[in-house]
Every structure is written in structure tokens, then in C-alpha cells.
Image (cartoon, coloured by chain):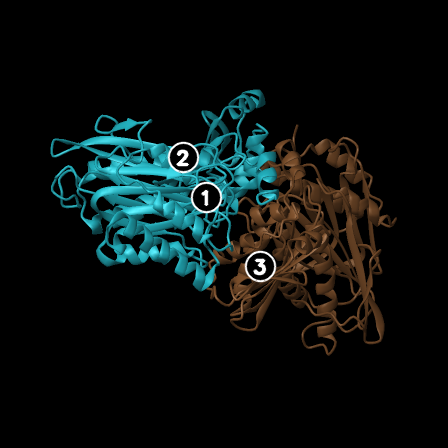
Chain colours: A brown, B cyan
């Protein structure tokens, strides 16, 4: 669980990917989608320390390889371009050429080195990028105008809302900002998903420390969300720190590292929850808290098994306090549990005590599940480790959206 | 894959759990469900060699413990009673007492030893069995009347059809029959599921050989089906061989063992496919064939990842030849694959060649997916191992059934 000392971190719910100083972003419609914005860019005034985490899917899409190449050079990026509607995945040699071309063309337009550009794509698998449209889009990048909402819109696919936030904290007496934007709605599952997330900060951060922080944070946030159990080919979380604030570069040796770490995690956690809440067809955000497990890994496995269960998800959609399905998912999580010790709560209502049904009012249970934010708490009473996972209910609309995504 | 020499094995599509000689079965309504039959029994004229495979869920239901106890005594059973509507799971000490009481009472009614009786329950988790109704039901068992359809009905929950089959083959020149019946519709996933399957044969089989055969067969059949990824607390596959035909007890040392093994596997495979086809809300049976994998285990993992993907399941429901979702599931199966080698077919239509899109007619793809039996073939070109998994599409009705199972 991420502990954020509220007093030290100020959350700006209306904050954006460019709330941190020196970052600019925008987006346009270039014709990949019918009407919606489909091409966005993120730009830093100066080269920024950069870190990324990529999908573990074997069919990693072409743009991820190009971004990896860029960051691999100097752990630095100055710009990222993203298109939606087309994943540039399973597109072979031509797809890779197209991604490299996108990087080159963007670098030329911005007058920066190629290795300072990252590229990303999200959308349909197996279709070549229409490069004429992409080329035309790149021509229209205006790097120093700032319209983050357009960027945040341009990266969406089946999402119904944009997802953005910023937090502020003091480092060396200066106000540091960390901003974030993400997309993701379907094909969402632990170990990255059809999701993209961008985090920017005007703090200076050591590149290695940034990479480590991003990896750790991803495990506890983005990798703990699931919409449908499908991990995609394009998922990327990317962080940029441009050092605009002139602080001593942050790393674990900095006295205020913990504070920065918590603030960074808060951004990721908020974005992750926003993705889960906007899951395809979802009407409810579900949070599964597992406590007193024998290890963090086991706590995570149990939380993921429950949040991924179609039967739990449909029961919550139907506001049915059918806790047997929660217990069932705990039981097949492959984590050894003691069935006679497990407690389960729906919100504040205890439904299982020591593996046996608790007396509770079905009506009260149903009333709780009719809310839009559901917490399922599972106490394993085995140790002291804990984990939290986020997801959403499974609804008619999920089926509708996915039975006709292309047509 | 199970190879059955058609010439040696005769499949009786209309065969039943009691087609093998000396087996009797029946069922009644005892008031656990509103109208449908809810209590069934299976009886062998003489004690039969018995073997069983149980759920791996940590919250194993009480009746499974009792059946294990019975079989544990002498690897022999003569009768099994099953109730639907109530799983007798998460029912603690009282639930266990009730299961033991059911066994005792059944043994008394039949005039046989307690250890010759197996018990099973399927249905809602966390509710105590209404023992008055169960006691009354046991009183009504008529062991030597034969009405297998009633047994096959009484074990159902959300199933829409009964599932039964029998096969015949020659052993030592005698016609041997293997009959089977199963139930299962929701909470169905590899490693057993809310499914019960019973297999009976009038051949004599060495108990250890029967157990080994059942375990191996279960891995390749019942454990390769999924409806919704949820493995239940009550799953059991149980086999009884009463030796009525007087053959030399079968084991791997018997010259006709292979033939028997294939016939036994055929029964399990047919029942497994019937369960997948009758998945909750399903309109299509999906078969995923993985070939040329580096190991059988890896082939199985890939097949299960694809058959379990909600996105694949909804695409097939919507008759959308969106092969990107198949590739995506292959990619996150955690099996190392070479993305540049993978071929994918929908039926006879090749949609991916060496990891790249094949030219194919979308209309032809859609037409194929509008059928009711869909085969997805994945060639990994890594080795020579193969595996097949079965499942079904994900539909509005799945959500409907599971958002309101209890209400």
C-alpha cells in the first residue's frame, strides 16, 4: 500500500501532464479516427531524465522498441509523440521502419536529436500506420504552445474520460510538481495493459533513480489494475524529469527522497484508479484490499485473483453480496491460505468470519454494492503483508463494446 | 491431443451413465430447487473400483472430504449421491457433519458399508444443507430402478442441457461399455471447476491404474476447458469400474490397455466439450488448438491463455475476426514464443503468417465466426508438442445470468 502523508503532498485533481514547469503538450486530429483527436505530443523545454516500463507481452509493438532505443542512449528524452487508433503491433519490418521514421521526422520538426524523441501507438493490432497522415500530423506540432487537454484526449481509445492529475510538494524548500496523464480502458491487466501513462516533473532526478522508482511504483499501481485480464502489446509508462527547479538531483541518497517517492507513487496510484474506474462498460470502481498475508507477493496474487474474477465482477454489477465468489477466487489464487481463518468484508460489512458466513443483512449488502466505489477487504490472518488491486464490474456494455470494436 | 481409433471405439451419443452393465441411477425433486430435480443417486450392483480427482481450490467443500475418506478405505465405491442447489462449501464443522450424515444415512438405506458411499454437492456456497430435505430424499432412493436421465438432470445447476455419452469397445473379445455424465456451466476453469463428472464402466480395472488413468485424462480434458476462469470449491471427477464383464483387471500390463485408455479419454473429452459448449450464456463452442510448441506444458499454457481471454471470447461472440486479440493472448501467456514465427488460423482461414497479418477476406472470416463451433489454430513452430483447450464465447447472457444468480 502506498502511504502518502497528506500534509506533505498537495493533490491537484485538475492538474495536468504539463502542470510541472517547462513541459508543453498538445494534440490534433490527423484522420486515424473518424472525428476524435488521434495524435498528441509532449515536449520539454530542455532534455529530461527519462525512464520507462514496457509491456511484458511477447508481441511488443514497434514503437516500444524505438522508445527503448532512444532512452537507451542517454536516459534522456525531450519529446514524445503518440497516436491512437492504430497500435503498430504485429506489423513486422515495415512497422518498425514506420516507428523509426516517426521518430526521425519528429526530431527534425523540433530541431532536436533523434534519440531525444520517444514514440507510442495504441489501437488496433496488425494494421500498418498510414504514414502520410502521420507525416502530416508531425508537421503540425507546435512545441511551445500548451494545450494538455488535447494531448490527454488524443491518446484515448475506448476511454470515456481523460485521466490526469498533478501533485505538489516541497523539495529543498522549492515547490516541485509531478504531473501525469494516462489512457486505458480495455485490454487492461496486471503486468501492463493497453495503457499508456506519462509522468512529468520539474524536479531534477538521477536517471537510474527515476527508472528504479518508476519500476517499483508500476508494480504497486498500474500492475495492480485489471479490467479484463488481457495484457496488451503496447503498454508503456514513461517518466520525464527536466530538472527545471534546479534542486540537487534526487536519488535515494537525497534526504527528501522518501517524500518525492510518495508523491510520485500518489500520481501513479491516482491514474491507475482512474483507468480501472473507466474500464470498458464499467459502472463501478472495485478496490480489493488483502491484508495480513504471508508475503507481499502472495497478497498481490490473492488481490489479483479476486479483482480478475468474472463472477465477482458480475456479482458486484448486479449488487449481489454473493461472497462465495470472493472466497472461491481466494481459494484458486494458488496462494496457500488457511480456509478456517479468512475474513471477508464488503465495505464495512463483514460477510465471512473465519471462513464461515457472518450474519449480515442482505439488504444492507445490496445497498452497499449499489454504490459506485466498492471495497472488498480480505484478511488472511497469516502474516503482516498487504496489497491492493483495482478493477471494475463486468457489464452488458463490456460485451457490447468488445463484440463490435471494429465494426 | 487424444487419438482415438474410430474403428476400435463405438461412440453412443445417446449413451448414459448407466449404459455400462450393473449400474443404476435415478433422481428426484426434494425441494432444494423450486421445481427442477435436485437429488440424484448412482448405484452399482456390486462394489466397484473407484478413483476420483478433486478441485485444487483451498476452500474444498465438505462432501469432497467425505468422498475422499470413502475411496481412501479400499479404493472402492458402490453408490454416490449428489445434490444440486447447495454446495455445502464454507459450512465449517456443521457442513462436514452433514456430509458424513448423508453418507451414513445413504449406506443404511442401501444396506451397504458407509465407506462404499460417495457424496457430492453443487450450488450456492456458504449455506448449510437443509438436512430434513436431504434425509427425506435419501428415503426415496430406489437403487435397482434405472432412470439415468433423472440423475443427469438432478446434478445440473445453471446448465441448460444434460451431458452424457457412452462408448463401447472390445476387451478380451467382450464388449465393454464406458458411460459418463457431467454437469458444469459457470465457474468453469482449468484445474477443475464447478463441474461434476461421473464415469462408469463394466470392465474390471485395477484401482491404481484407474486412478492414474483418471488423473492423466482429467489433465487433458476437464482441465482444458474454461467458461469464465473461476475454479470452484466442489469440482469432482469420479470413476467406477464394477468388473461386471469378468475380464482380467485392466492396467498398463494388459495388452489392450491402450485401447481402453483411448476409450476412457474419449468419454472425458466428449463430456468436457459438452460442458464448454453449455457455458453460461454461450452461443458457440470454441476450440483452441496449439501445435508445434516446445513442450506440452507450454502448449497448454498458450491454449488456456487464448481460450480464457475475455477479448477473444467477445470478438468471437461478435463474429469479428479480430486476430490481434488472439496474438495478444499468446503474447501474455508467459510462454516464450518467437513473434516472427507464429501462424494463426480461424478454421481453415489463415489470418496470421509468421507474426504478420495474412491477406484474407473479412467477410469470409465473419461468416466462419458466425458458426456455432469455432476452431482457433495456433502454430508456434518451436517444437512438436501440442494441446487443445475448449471454451465458449462471452455474451450478454453470461452477464445477465451472473449478475442475478441468487435473486
Q: Do labels 3 and 1 share a chain?
A: no
Q: Relative to A387, is B316 above or below?
A: above
Residue position marked by numbered label 3 in the rendering: A303
Location of the N terminus of chain A by quadrant is bottom right
Q: Within 10 Å of the Cα at label 2, are there few (<14), some (14-19), or many (20+) other Cα atoms?
A: many
Q: Marks 3 and 1, how far apart in space? A: 21 Å
- Give the chain letter at badge 3: A
Tell me, yes or no, whether dots 2 and 3 are on the same chain. Answer: no
Label 3: element kind: helix
Q: Do labels 1 and 2 share a chain?
A: yes
In percent of width and height, residue A13 lies at 82, 58
Residue A4, quarter of picture: bottom right
Q: Which one is nearer the viewer's eye here, A256 or B213?
A: B213
Task: In the rendered structure, find residue B304 and report the number of the disc placed on it.
Answer: 1
**What x and y, as percent, mark residue A360?**
63, 60
Determine the CA span between mark 1 and mark 2: 14 Å
Residue at point 80%, 59% (across, down):
A166
| Residue under the point 79% across and 46% down | A151
Q: Which chain carries label 1?
A: B
Percent coordinates x, y for residue A139 in the rendering = 80, 38
Q: How crowded is mark 3: few (under 14 residues within 10 Å), some or many (20 or more)?
A: many
Q: Which of marks 1 and 2 is nearer the N terminus?
A: 2
Residue A65 - label: none
Classify mark 2: helix, strand or loop: helix
Q: Which numbered disc covers residue B273?
A: 2
Amino acid at each position: 500500500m502506498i502511504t502518502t502523508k497528506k500534509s506533505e503532498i498537495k493533490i491537484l485533481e485538475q492538474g495536468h501532464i504539463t502542470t510541472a514547469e517547462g513541459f508543453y503538450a498538445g494534440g490534433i486530429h490527423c484522420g486515424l479516427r473518424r472525428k476524435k483527436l488521434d495524435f498528441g505530443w509532449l515536449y520539454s523545454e530542455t532534455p529530461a531524465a527519462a525512464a520507462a516500463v514496457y509491456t511484458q507481452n511477447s508481441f511488443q509493438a514497434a514503437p516500444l522498441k524505438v522508445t527503448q532505443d532512444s532512452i537507451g542512449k542517454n536516459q534522456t528524452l525531450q519529446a514524445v509523440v503518440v497516436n491512437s487508433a492504430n497500435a503498430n503491433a504485429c506489423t513486422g519490418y515495415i512497422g518498425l521502419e514506420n516507428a523509426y521514421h516517426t521518430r526521425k521526422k519528429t526530431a527534425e520538426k523540433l530541431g532536436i536529436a533523434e534519440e531525444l524523441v520517444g514514440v507510442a501507438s495504441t489501437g488496433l493490432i496488425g494494421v500498418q500506420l498510414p504514414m502520410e497522415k502521420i507525416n502530416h500530423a508531425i508537421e503540425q506540432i507546435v512545441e511551445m504552445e500548451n494545450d494538455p487537454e488535447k494531448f490527454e484526449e488524443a491518446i484515448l481509445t475506448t476511454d470515456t474520460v481523460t485521466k490526469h492529475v498533478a501533485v505538489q510538494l516541497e523539495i529543498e524548500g522549492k515547490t516541485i510538481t509531478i504531473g501525469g496523464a494516462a489512457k486505458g480502458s480495455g485490454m487492461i491487466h496486471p503486468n501492463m495493459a493497453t495503457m499508456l501513462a506519462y509522468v512529468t516533473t520539474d524536479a531534477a532526478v538521477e536517471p537510474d533513480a527515476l527508472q528504479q522508482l518508476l519500476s517499483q511504483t508500476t508494480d504497486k499501481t498500474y500492475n495492480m489494475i485489471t479490467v479484463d485480464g488481457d495484457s496488451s502489446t503496447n503498454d508503456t509508462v514513461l517518466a520525464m524529469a527536466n530538472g527545471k527547479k534546479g534542486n540537487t538531483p534526487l536519488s535515494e541518497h537525497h534526504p527528501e527522497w522518501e517524500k518525492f517517492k510518495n508523491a510520485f507513487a500518489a500520481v501513479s496510484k491516482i491514474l491507475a484508479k482512474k483507468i480501472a474506474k473507466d474500464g470498458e462498460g464499467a459502472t463501478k470502481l472495485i478496490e480489493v484490499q488483502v491484508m495480513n498475508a504471508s508475503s507481499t507477493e502472495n497478497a498481490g496474487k490473492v488481490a489479483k485473483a479476486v479483482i480478475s474474477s468474472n463472477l465477482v465482477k458480475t456479482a458486484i454489477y448486479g449488487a449481489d453480496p454473493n461472497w462465495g465468489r470472493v472466497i472461491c477466487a481466494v481459494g484458486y489464487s494458488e496462494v496457500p491460505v488457511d480456509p478456517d481463518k479468512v475474513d471477508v468484508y464488503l465495505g464495512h460489512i463483514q460477510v465471512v468470519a473465519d471462513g464461515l458466513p457472518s450474519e449480515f443483512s442482505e439488504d444492507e449488502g445490496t445497498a452497499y454494492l449499489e454504490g459506485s466505489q466498492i471495497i472488498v477487504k480480505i484478511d488472511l490472518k497469516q502474516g503482516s503483508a498487504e496489497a491492493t488491486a483495482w478493477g471494475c464490474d463486468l457489464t452488458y456494455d463490456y460485451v457490447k463494446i468488445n463484440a463490435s470494436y471494429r465494426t
